[in-house]
């Protein structure tokens, strides 16, 4: 179990219990006053959330004995996060992702339900008008990478097949970029398809490879300053929707990838790690596709959707 307390050797200031009683009383009086300011909030949920935020924020300020210079820096940082955010780039979500707050929100809202497939982060690279492919189609759209046959089923938690589920898939190319990150208007590495009458699906994609989150902004600088890597473990994104069932946003990860333990957005869950089995160039493909002298891989992902 990691030690969640601050390291007294490296933290210059004391925590709130090490300050004189009179000072503690001043700090606590302020917290009470701020909490009281939200006491008459008409929306009880909003009042609850704001009061909890105040309690935790003040606990943080008091625990680290935040200096005024540090407060200035924090404001400067958040201002930069705001300035770089536009309708193509969402640095606030990225910040939430690298702090584990996105993943914790997903955990809180997607409690285990039978053997339902686990959810993970959405990420910034989904688009909702990706092309449709038929069963066995190719999502790569010309993106570079090793061809990968992906197949599986969609079922509910009773084990019944879910036909006609909408399956969105998207991924980066072998160079670590999504189509959206190129300046041309290419559409590649993404598509949607529908499960067949038995809940089955199959398509050609690319064997996932590792890539960094966008790290040329304030979040990237924070990672560098704290000695953290911007790399994500190799993955293939899925979003699966079907009537009366909980929408699943998830990825599958590549067993053996050395980044599984250090995914910078904490998105890896054991159940989502799959075998991407390498195939020699002369191995016959499942659908008879000719790949010439190219090797390929295959992976299986059986999806279970929770009730809505
Ligand atoms: C991604 O999966 O592509 C991603 C997820 C979270 C933050 C940045 C990128
Ligand atoms: Fe991704």
Image (tube, grey):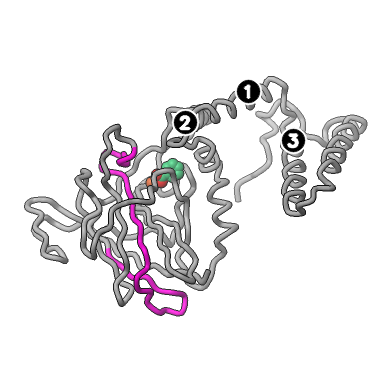
**From the Cβ of disc 2, is ligand 1 less than 8 Å away?**
no
Q: Residues within 10 Å of mark 1 (few under 14, many from 20)?
A: few
Q: Residues within 10 Å of mark 2 (few under 14, many from 20)?
A: many
Looking at the picture, how far across and down is residue 121, in whole percent?
47, 50
Q: Residue furthest top?
A: 69
Q: Does 57 sit left or right of 190 as displayed?
A: right
The tag on residue 249 is: none
Residue 263 in sight in this render: no
| Residue under the point 54% across and 66% down | 112
**From the Cβ of disc 1, is ligand 1 less than 8 Å away?**
no
Looking at the picture, how far across and down is residue 64, in whole percent?
71, 32
In this figure, which residue is indicated by the disc labeled 3?
63
How many angstroms separate mark 1 from mark 3 (CA)?
A: 18 Å
In this figure, which residue is indicated by the disc labeled 1?
73
Q: In this rendering, which labeled residue sits more in front, label 1 or label 3?
A: 1
The tag on residue 220 is: 2
Whether residue 20 is situated above or below residue 263 in the rendered picture: above
Q: Residue furthest right?
A: 22
For mark 2, give the secondary structure.
Answer: helix
- Write the start and end of the magenta stretch as one range: 151-180
For mark 1, give the secondary structure.
Answer: helix
Q: Is residue 213 one of those drawn in magenta?
A: no
Whether residue 48 is situated above or below residue 305 in the rendered picture: above
Residue 67 vs residue 113, the one in the foreground? 113
Q: In this rendering, which labeled residue sits more in front, label 2 or label 3?
A: 2
Looking at the picture, how far across and down is residue 216, in whole percent?
43, 28
Looking at the picture, how far across and down is residue 296, in whole percent?
18, 55
């Amino acid at each position: 179990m990691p030690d969640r307390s601050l390291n007294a050797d490296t933290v210059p200031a004391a925590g709130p219990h090490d300050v004189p009683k009179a000072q503690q009383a001043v700090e606590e009086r302020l917290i009470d006053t701020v909490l009281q300011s939200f006491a008459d909030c008409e929306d009880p949920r909003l009042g609850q959330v704001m009061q909890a935020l105040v309690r935790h924020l003040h606990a943080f300020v008091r625990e680290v004995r935040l200096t005024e210079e540090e407060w200035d820096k924090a404001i400067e940082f958040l201002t930069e996060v705001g300035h770089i955010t536009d309708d193509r780039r969402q640095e606030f979500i990225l910040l939430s992702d690298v702090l584990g707050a996105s993943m914790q929100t997903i955990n809180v809202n997607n409690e285990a339900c039978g053997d339902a497939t686990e959810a993970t982060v959405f990420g910034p690279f989904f688009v909702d008008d990706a092309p449709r492919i038929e069963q066995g189609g190719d999502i790569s759209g010309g993106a570079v990478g090793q061809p990968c046959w992906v197949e599986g089923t969609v079922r509910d938690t009773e084990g019944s097949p879910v036909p006609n589920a909408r399956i969105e898939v998207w991924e980066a190319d072998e160079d670590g970029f999504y189509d959206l990150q190129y300046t041309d208007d290419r559409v590649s590495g993404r598509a949607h398809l529908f499960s067949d009458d038995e809940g089955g699906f199959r398509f050609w994609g690319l064997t996932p490879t590792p890539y960094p989150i966008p790290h040329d902004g304030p979040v990237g600088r924070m990672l560098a300053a704290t000695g953290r890597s911007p790399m994500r473990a190799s993955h293939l994104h899925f979003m699966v929707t079907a009537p009366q069932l909980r929408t699943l946003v998830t990825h599958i990860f590549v067993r053996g990838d050395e980044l599984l333990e250090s995914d910078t957005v904490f998105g890896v869950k054991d159940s989502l790690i799959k075998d991407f089995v390498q195939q020699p160039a002369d191995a016959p493909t499942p659908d008879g596709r000719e790949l010439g002298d190219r090797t390929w891989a295959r992976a299986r992902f059986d999806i279970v959707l929770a009730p809505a």
